[in-house]
Image (tube, helix red, strand yellow):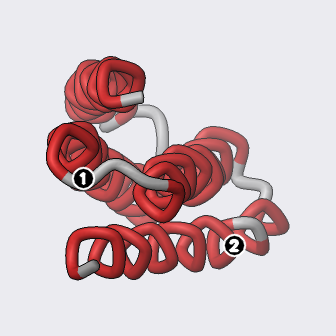
Amino acid sequence: MDRLFFTIGCAFGFLGVALGAFAAHALKARIGSDLLSTFEVGVRYQLVHALALLAVAWAQTRWPGPVLWAAGWLFVIGIALFSGSLYALSLTGARALGAITPLGGVALLAGWLCLAVAVWR
């Protein structure tokens, strides 16, 4: 499981840098500053939580267990829902997609909680 979360974390990190560059160079002239800012928040959270997945992978080598496994998947789901919904909202302008964002945020918070619990045990 540690290799899986490490690989997923690297993939999300790679995509975060690519999407950040895309926003800075291609989107800047195509969407409004408010939507660009929203896109950038998605990139920021994706990059931070890509690192969190690397932490989960490392922690798996020291304190393996189901709570740590849950932390990793919560981060994956959280990135997909939180950042993904912000990307979609920014690119389409469909404000209704913003309703998905808090679900991703809750998953990210739960991931941090699970990570702390798993390491504390």
Q: Amino acid at mark 1?
A: Ala
Q: Name the residue carrying label 1.
A: 52
Above or below, 41 against 92 in this view is below
Q: Residue 107's image quarter?
A: bottom right
> At 43% across and 73% down in the image, what residue appears?
114
Above or below, 104 against 42 in this view is below
Above or below, 82 against 91 in this view is below
The CA distance from mark 2 to mark 1 is: 18 Å
Q: Judging from the image, what secondary structure is the residue with disc 1 in? A: helix
Above or below, 11 against 83 in this view is above
Crowd band around label 1 with a 10 angstrom C-alpha radius: few (<14), some (14–19), many (20+): many
Query: Is residue 93 something one can see in this rendering?
Result: yes
Horizontal side of 87 relative to 13 (left or right) equals: right
Query: Is residue 26 something one can see in this rendering?
Result: no
Q: Amino acid at mark 2?
A: Leu
Q: Quadrant of the N terminus?
A: top left
Horizontal side of 59 relative to 8 (left or right) equals: left
Q: Residue 118's image quarter?
A: bottom left
Q: Position of residue 10 (x, y in %)?
A: 25, 22
Q: Position of residue 103 (x, y in %)?
A: 69, 72
> At 32% across and 34% down in the image, what residue appears?
23
> At 70% across and 53% down in the image, what residue appears?
93
Q: Toward the viewer: 118 or 37? A: 118
> At 61% across and 65% down in the image, what residue appears?
104
Q: Position of residue 75 (x, y in %)?
A: 46, 54
Q: Name the residue carrying label 2.
A: 103
Q: Which mark is residue 98?
A: none
Q: How many badges with numbers are in the image? A: 2
Q: Position of residue 36 (x, y in %)?
A: 39, 52
Q: Judging from the image, what secondary structure is the residue with disc 2 in? A: helix
